[in-house]
Image (cartoon, coloured by chain):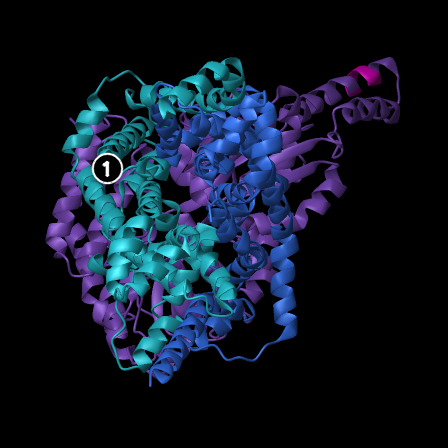
Chain colours: A purple, B cyan, C blue
C-alpha cells in the first residue's frame, strides 16, 4: 500500500552519512590514486572519520530517566525485568511509574501540559493518539530515527508492524489525521493487539464441530456445546469498554457495517449505529444469551478470562492479550485444550476487529538535555530483543513482525500467527479520531448492556445510541 | 452573670486570641480559597483535555447541567444513597451502641473488630466485596444457594446494584455512627438511669424519653457527618460498580469524576462539583436551623 | 424465675456478641483464605478448601510486599498521615480552644464555615491542590501530600476538640484567668492535660479520614517509591484487567492486618477519649 511505501522511504533507515560516505570514499580513492596514496592508507583515514560518528551504546551512561506507562497490562512487569539489562548495555537508569488506566491518562495529561514533564517517556493508548499527539504534545522523532549515531544500527525501523505504526506512531499534524503522512511521533510499544477467536479444541472435536468461520457457525456451535458445566460461548456483557469496542464492533464490521461516514475533522461526521448491521450485531449478542454463562451480563474482562481459563466457556472472541493467562499451565486448566483462529465473519467479509495497542513517545516539554538519552532508551525498550521477551515471558502482543515470526516462539505459542494476522488486518475505529471517543463508548456500553439485561430491545438501544451520539457530535462541532 | 463574664473574657482575649486562632484560619483560607476559586472559574469555561484553551462560556455549563437527564439521574441516585444509607447506619449504629452498653466481657475485642471496615482502603473494600459477591465463585452466593434460595444479581441488575452499594456503605460506615453514639452513651451519668428504674419506668420508655434525647447531639453529629461524606463518596462506587449498570449507581460525585477523568470535560465536571457544593451548603444550613450541632447549646 | 430469665437473657446477649464478632471478622477471614490460594484455585474451588500450601503463600506475599512494594507504601502512608495529623493537632487545638472559651461575634459562623470545608467534592479539590503544591516545588515529595492533608484534617480536629473543651468546667478557665494566666499558658499548662484523651481521639479520627485519601496523592506523587497505600493498592487492583484475585486478596490482607492491630489497641482510646470529658 502506498502509505507504507512512503513511510519506508522518508524515514527509512538509510543513514545519510553512509550514502555520503560512499560517494566521498569513491572520490577519495580517485584522489588518492592520483596522489599516489595507497588504498589502505585512505581506507584507514576514512574509517577514522567514520568512527567519529559511529554509534556508541553507552553514550548516555549515567543518565536517570523516568517512564510513565500502563500498569494494567504486564508491560511494566516485562520492562521491570529488563531494567538491569538496560543499565548494563546503555548505562541508563530507568524508573517505571505504572498507574491504572484512568490514573495514567490523568497523569499523562498533567505532565504533557506542564512546563516540564516529570517523565521523559510516556506510553499512550492508540485510542488517545489523536488527542495527545494531535494536541502537539509529543516530540517529532524523524530526525532521531534518521540519525545513525543516535539510533542503534540493528534497531530496524522497518520491522514494526505497519498497522501498529499507523495506529500509534504516524500523525499528520497539519491535517489532523492519524496514520497519514510520514511524520513519526511515537514508537509502537510496549504492546499492540487486536481480537482473536479462542475455542476449546477438545470440546469441538468431541462434538465433531469445526471452529466457527461465520457468525451462524458461532451460534450453532454455542447451542450445541452448551451444557450445565460449560457455556456454549461467552462475551463481555457488562457495562464495560470492550462490550462496544470488541463484541459489538467486531460483529458489526464483519457483517458489513460502517460506523461513521464523513471526515472526523469536518462537519458531517455521521454515525450509523441504527443501521441494520448495527442492530443486527447487538441482536446477535442477545440471541446467544441463552448459551452464555448465567451471569454474563456482569462479565467484564476479568470474569471472562477467569471463566475461560477455569474451563467454563467453550468459545469466545477476545483481546489477544489474554492468550497469556489462558495458555499458562499455572493459571489455567485449559492451557492444552485451547486453540485460536481468526474471528468469525459474515460472508465475503475479512475477519477483523478493532486495533488496540500502545505507543511510547517523548513529550515535547522534556528537559532538552535529556531528550537524546530518552530516545536512546526508547530505542532500547522497543528493540527486537525486548519484543521477543515480551512474547516469551508474558505473551504480550509485540509490535515487530520479526517477533511474530521467530521460529522458537512460534513453536511454543501456536496462537501467534492468528494474533499477527489480526493485528495486520485490524481496523482503527473511526471514533478514536475525535476527543469524545470515551464518552461515546461509554454511552454505547450503557445502552447495550441495558439491552442485554432485558431493559430494552436491540432496535431501541441502537436508536438511543444514535441519538445520543449525534448530540455529542453536534456539541463537539463534528456534526452540523 | 454569664454575660458579664463573657465580656470580660473577650476583653482580655484580644491579641492572644488571634495568635491562637490565626494560624488555623490562615491555613484553611490558603487551602480552601484557591481550590474554590479555581474550580469556580473552571466551571465557567468549556475546558476539555485536547482543547487546552478553555473559553469563557459563562453559565452555559450550569444550564446544560439542568437540562441533562444524566445529571438528574445522578442527583436522584445521590439522594437515594444518602437518605437510605445514612438512615440505616444511624438506626444500626444506635442499636449497636445500646447493645454494647451492656458491657459484656470481651466486648472491647468485638468492638475493635467492628471498627475495622471504616479503616480499610476503599479499593480493598471494593475488591473484598466483589470477591464475596462474585456470581461464579463467591462464598456469599454459594451459601445462599446452599440454603435453597436464588442469589440476587448483586451488581448486575439495575434495581439491585444500588441496594448492594448501600449495603456495602452501611457495612463500612455504621461503625462510625456506632462509636460516636456509644461514646456519648458512656458519658451519660448513671444516676439518671438509676432514678428512672427506681421509678419503675419500662426499658422502652427509658430509651425513648431519656436516652434518646440525651444521645441526640451525638446522633445528629454523626448523621450530618455521614450524610456529607456519603454525598461526596466516590471511591466505593469506583471500586465496586463503576457507576453501572446502566448508570444506576452513578451519583453526582461519580458523575463529576466521570466527566473530569474519563471524558475530560473539565469545565462541566467543575460545574457539577459546584452544584454539589451548593446542595450541601443549602442542605446543611437548612438542617442545622432545626437541630443544634454543638451540645453546649442544648445545655 | 427472674434469675433464670436474666441468665437466659445474658446468654442470648453473649451469643449475639459472638455472632457479631464472627460476622464482622468473616469477610476478612475470607480475604485471608483467598490470598493463600492460587488464582486458578480461587476460580475452581467453591467453597475454598482449607488446605494451605506454604510455597504458594510465601510467593504471593513476597511478591505483594516486595516486588509490588506494599511494604514501602505502608511506610509512606504512616509517615505522611502521622505528620499531617501531628500538624493538624498543633494548629487546630488552639483554634478549638478559642472557639470554646471565647465567644466572639460570629464565632458560630466561623466554626460552621470551618466544618463546611469538608464539603467540597474531592475531584474539584484535587487538581487545584496539586497545582498549588507544584507551584511551591513540593510536587512528588512527602510535604506535597502532608500540607494538603493537614487542611483536610483541620476541620475535624477543631470540631472534636471544641467538643472536649466544652466539657471542661468554665470555673477552671475563669479561675486561671483571675490568677493572671495568659491564654497560651492557660492552654498549654491547664487545658491540655485535661483534654489529653481528646487529643488522642481527634488524632485518630483525623488519621482515619486521610489514611485512605486517593485523588490528591494520585496527582502529587509521581515516583513509585513515594506512593501511599491507596495509590499502591490502586495499581494492583484495576477494574479493567484480569484481577489476580490472590494478589488482590493478599494486598487486602497486608493492608488490613496492621490496621486490625492498631484498631484493637487504640479502640479503647477512641471510646474513652470521647467519654472522658464527661463530668461525673
Q: Which quadrant of the structure image shows residue A13?
A: top right
Coordinates of residue C90 in the picture (x, y in percent): 57, 30
Towards the viewer: B7 or C160: B7
Magenta region, residue range = A29-33
Residue appearing at x 55%, y 47% in the figure: C229
Where does label 1 land, which residue?
A: B287
In the image, B158: left or right of A199? Answer: left
In the image, B210: left or right of B103? Answer: left
Coordinates of residue A112 in the picture (x, y in percent): 48, 26
Total tally of numbered discs in the picture: 1
The relative height of residue B37 versus residue C214 in the rendered view (above or below) is above
Towards the viewer: B166 or B59: B166
The relative height of residue A19 versus residue B287 in the rendered view (above or below) is above
Coordinates of residue C128 in the picture (x, y in percent): 44, 25
Determine if residue C129 is in view.
Answer: yes
In the image, A67: left or right of B261? Answer: right
Towards the viewer: C169 or A23: C169
Q: Pointer 1: residues within 10 angstroms few (<14), some, or many (20+)?
A: some
Towards the viewer: A157 or A176: A176
Residue appearing at x 24%, y 57% in the figure: B208
Residue appearing at x 84%, y 22% in the figure: A45
Determine if residue A139 is in view.
Answer: no
Amino acid at each position: 500500500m502506498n502509505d507504507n511505501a512512503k513511510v519506508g522511504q522518508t524515514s527509512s533507515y538509510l543513514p545519510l552519512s553512509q550514502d555520503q560516505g560512499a560517494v566521498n570514499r569513491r572520490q577519495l580513492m580517485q584522489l588518492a590514486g592520483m596522489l599516489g596514496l595507497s588504498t589502505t592508507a585512505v581506507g584507514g583515514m576514512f574509517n577514522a572519520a567514520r568512527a567519529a560518528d559511529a554509534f556508541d551504546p553507552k553514550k548516555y551512561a549515567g543518565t536517570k530517566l523516568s517512564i510513565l506507562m500502563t500498569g494494567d497490562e504486564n508491560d511494566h512487569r516485562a520492562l521491570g525485568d529488563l531494567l538491569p539489562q538496560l543499565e548494563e548495555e546503555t548505562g541508563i537508569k530507568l524508573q517505571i511509574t505504572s498507574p491504572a488506566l484512568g490514573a495514567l491518562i490523568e497523569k499523562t495529561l498533567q505532565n504533557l501540559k506542564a512546563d516540564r514533564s516529570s517523565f521523559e517517556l510516556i506510553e499512550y493508548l492508540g485510542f488517545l493518539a489523536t488527542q495527545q499527539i494531535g494536541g502537539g504534545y509529543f516530540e517529532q522523532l524523524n530526525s532521531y530515527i534518521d540519525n545513525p549515531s543516535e539510533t542503534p544500527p540493528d534497531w530496524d525501523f522497518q520491522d514494526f508492524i505497519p498497522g501498529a505504526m499507523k495506529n500509534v506512531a504516524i500523525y499528520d499534524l497539519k491535517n489532523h489525521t492519524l496514520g497519514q503522512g510520514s511524520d513519526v511521533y511515537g514508537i509502537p510499544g510496549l504492546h499492540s493487539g487486536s481480537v482473536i477467536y479462542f475455542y476449546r479444541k477438545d470440546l469441538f472435536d468431541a462434538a465433531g464441530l469445526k471452529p466457527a468461520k461465520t457468525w451462524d457457525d458461532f451460534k450453532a456451535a454455542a447451542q450445541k456445546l452448551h451444557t450445565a458445566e460449560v457455556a456454549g460461548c461467552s462475551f463481555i456483557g457488562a457495562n464495560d469498554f470492550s462490550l462496544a469496542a470488541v463484541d459489538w464492533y467486531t460483529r458489526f464490521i464483519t457483517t458489513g457495517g460502517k460506523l461513521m461516514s464523513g471526515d472526523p475533522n469536518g462537519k458531517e461526521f455521521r454515525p450509523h449505529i441504527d443501521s441494520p448491521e448495527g442492530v443486527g450485531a447487538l441482536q446477535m449478542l442477545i440471541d446467544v444469551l441463552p448459551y452464555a454463562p448465567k451471569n454474563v451480563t456482569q462479565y467484564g474482562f476479568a470474569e471472562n478470562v477467569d471463566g475461560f481459563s477455569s474451563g467454563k466457556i467453550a468459545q469466545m472472541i477476545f483481546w489477544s492479550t489474554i492468550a497469556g493467562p489462558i495458555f499458562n499451565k499455572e493459571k489455567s486448566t485449559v492451557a492444552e485444550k485451547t486453540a485460536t483462529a481468526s474471528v468469525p465473519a459474515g460472508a465475503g467479509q475479512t475477519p477483523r476487529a478493532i486495533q488496540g495497542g500502545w505507543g511510547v513517545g517523548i513529550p515535547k516539554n522534556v528537559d532538552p538535555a535529556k531528550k537524546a538519552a530518552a530516545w536512546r532508551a526508547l530505542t532500547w525498550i522497543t528493540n527486537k530483543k525486548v519484543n521477543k521477551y515480551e512474547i516469551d515471558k508474558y505473551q504480550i502482543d509485540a509490535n515487530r513482525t520479526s517477533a511474530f515470526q521467530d521460529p522458537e516462539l512460534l513453536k511454543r505459542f501456536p496462537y501467534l500467527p492468528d494474533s499477527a494476522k489480526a493485528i495486520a488486518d485490524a481496523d482503527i475505529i473511526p471514533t478514536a479520531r475525535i476527543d469524545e471517543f470515551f464518552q461515546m463508548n461509554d454511552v454505547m456500553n450503557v445502552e447495550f448492556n441495558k439491552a442485554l439485561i432485558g431493559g430494552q430491545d436491540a432496535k431501541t438501544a441502537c436508536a438511543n445510541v444514535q441519538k445520543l451520539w449525534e448530540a455529542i457530535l453536534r456539541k463537539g462541532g463534528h456534526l452540523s | 452573670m454569664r454575660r458579664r463574664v463573657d465580656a470580660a473574657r473577650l476583653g482580655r482575649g484580644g491579641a492572644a486570641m488571634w495568635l491562637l486562632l490565626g494560624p488555623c484560619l490562615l491555613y484553611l483560607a490558603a487551602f480552601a480559597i484557591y481550590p474554590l476559586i479555581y474550580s469556580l472559574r473552571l466551571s465557567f469555561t468549556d475546558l476539555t483535555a485536547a482543547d487546552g484553551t478553555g473559553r469563557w462560556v459563562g453559565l452555559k455549563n450550569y444550564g446544560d447541567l439542568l437540562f441533562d437527564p444524566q445529571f438528574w439521574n445522578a442527583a436522584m441516585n445521590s439522594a437515594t444513597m444518602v437518605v437510605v444509607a445514612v438512615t440505616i447506619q444511624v438506626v444500626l449504629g444506635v442499636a449497636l451502641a445500646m447493645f454494647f452498653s451492656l458491657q459484656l466481657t470481651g466486648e472491647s475485642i468485638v468492638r475493635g473488630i467492628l471498627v475495622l471496615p471504616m479503616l480499610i482502603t476503599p479499593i480493598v473494600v471494593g475488591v473484598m466485596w466483589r470477591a464475596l459477591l462474585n456470581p461464579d465463585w463467591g462464598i456469599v452466593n454459594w451459601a445462599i444457594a446452599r440454603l435453597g434460595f436464588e442469589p440476587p444479581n448483586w451488581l448486575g441488575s439495575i434495581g439491585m446494584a444500588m441496594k448492594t452499594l448501600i449495603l456495602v456503605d452501611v457495612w463500612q460506615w455504621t461503625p462510625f455512627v456506632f462509636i460516636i453514639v456509644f461514646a456519648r452513651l458512656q458519658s451519660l451519668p448513671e444516676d439518671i438511669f438509676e432514678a428512672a428504674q427506681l421509678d419503675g419506668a419500662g426499658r422502652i420508655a427509658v430509651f425513648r424519653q431519656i436516652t434518646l434525647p440525651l444521645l441526640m447531639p451525638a446522633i445528629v453529629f454523626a448523621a450530618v457527618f455521614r450524610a456529607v461524606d456519603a454525598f461526596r463518596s466516590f471511591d466505593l462506587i469506583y471500586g465496586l460498580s463503576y457507576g453501572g449498570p446502566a448508570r444506576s449507581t452513578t451519583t453526582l460525585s461519580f458523575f463529576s469524576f466521570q466527566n473530569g477523568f474519563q471524558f475530560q470535560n473539565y469545565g462541566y465536571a467543575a460545574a457539577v462539583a459546584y452544584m454539589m457544593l451548593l446542595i450541601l451548603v443549602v442542605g446543611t444550613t437548612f438542617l442545622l436551623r432545626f437541630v443544634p450541632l454543638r451540645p453546649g447549646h442544648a445545655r | 424465675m427472674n434469675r433464670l430469665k436474666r441468665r437466659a437473657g445474658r446468654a442470648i446477649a453473649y451469643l449475639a456478641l459472638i455472632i457479631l464478632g464472627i460476622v464482622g471478622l468473616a469477610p476478612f477471614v475470607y480475604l485471608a483464605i483467598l490470598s493463600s490460594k492460587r488464582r486458578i484455585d480461587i476460580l475452581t474451588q467453591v467453597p475454598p478448601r482449607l488446605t494451605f500450601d506454604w510455597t504458594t503463600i510465601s510467593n504471593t506475599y513476597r511478591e505483594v510486599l516486595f516486588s509490588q512494594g506494599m511494604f514501602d507504601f505502608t511506610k509512606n502512608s504512616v509517615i505522611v498521615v502521622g505528620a499531617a495529623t501531628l500538624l493538624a493537632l498543633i494548629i487546630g487545638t488552639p483554634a478549638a480552644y478559642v472557639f470554646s472559651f471565647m465567644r466572639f461575634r460570629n464565632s458560630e459562623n466561623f466554626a460552621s464555615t470551618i466544618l463546611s470545608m469538608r464539603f467540597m467534592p474531592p475531584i474539584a479539590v484535587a487538581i487545584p491542590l496539586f497545582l498549588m503544591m507544584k507551584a511551591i516545588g513540593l510536587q512528588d515529595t512527602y510535604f506535597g501530600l502532608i500540607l494538603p492533608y493537614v487542611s483536610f484534617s483541620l476541620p475535624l480536629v477543631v470540631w472534636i476538640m471544641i467538643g472536649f473543651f466544652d466539657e471542661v468546667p468554665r470555673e477552671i478557665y475563669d479561675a486561671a484567668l483571675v490568677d493572671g494566666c495568659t491564654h497560651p499558658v492557660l492552654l498549654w499548662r491547664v487545658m491540655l492535660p485535661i483534654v489529653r484523651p481528646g487529643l488522642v481521639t481527634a488524632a485518630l479520627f483525623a488519621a482515619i479520614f486521610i489514611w485512605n485519601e486517593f485523588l490528591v496523592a494520585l496527582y502529587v506523587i509521581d515516583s513509585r517509591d513515594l506512593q501511599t497505600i491507596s495509590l499502591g493498592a490502586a495499581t494492583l487492583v484495576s477494574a479493567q484487567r484480569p484481577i489476580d484475585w490472590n494478589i488482590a486478596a493478599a494486598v487486602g490482607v497486608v493492608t488490613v492486618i496492621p490496621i486490625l492491630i492498631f484498631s484493637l489497641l487504640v479502640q479503647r482510646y477512641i471510646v474513652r477519649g470521647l467519654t472522658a470529658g464527661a463530668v461525673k
